[in-house]
Image (spheres, rainbow, N blue to C red):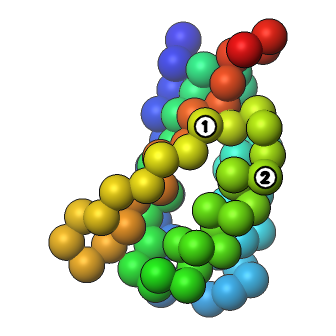
Amino acid sequence: MKKIARIDLAGVPWPVNLLQCCRHTGEMQPGDAMVISVKDEDVKDSLLLILNATPEFSVDVSERGQRFAINVTKNKAGG
């Protein structure tokens, strides 16, 4: 079953926000999705660099008011 997790990293200092993101993405199973909420554009850009470098994840970002939503999906095995 597909699981969608939401984590709010707005106001969480660097590098703690990176560590929390890595912990949550490490727990994801194929087909799971997660929405990461951040306020700082530099944090968003840094997280995107790391997430986009990991081929097992599909990543999309959108702006919602004064926040950024990073949508991460763990690709299914073999795809």
Q: What residue lies at 71% left-to-right and 79% top-to-bottom? A: 16
Horizontally, is 64 left or right of 72 in the view? left
Quadrant assignment, res 43? bottom right
Say which quadrant the N terminus sits in: top right
Do residues under tags 1 and 2 come within 8 Å of each other at their CB atoms? no
Residue 15 visible (yes or no): yes
Horizontally, is 51 left or right of 59 in the view? right
Sort mark 2 into few (<14), some (14-19) or many (20+) by Cα contacts within 10 Å: few
Q: What residue lies at 70% left-to-right and 54% top-to-bottom? A: 51
43 vs 34: above or below? below
Residue at mark 1 to residue at mark 2: CA–CA distance: 10 Å
Horizontally, is 41 left or right of 57 in the view? left
Sort mark 1 into few (<14), some (14-19) or many (20+) by Cα contacts within 10 Å: some
Residue 23 visible (yes or no): no
- Return the mark for residue 58: 1
User: Helix, strand or loop at disc 1?
Assistant: strand
55 vs 78: above or below? below
Return the x and y of residue 23 as percentages of the image width and height.
76, 55
Q: Amino acid at mark 2?
A: Ala
User: Helix, strand or loop at disc 2?
Assistant: loop
Q: What residue lies at 76% left-to-right and 69% top-to-bottom? A: 19
Q: Which residue is mark 2?
A: 53
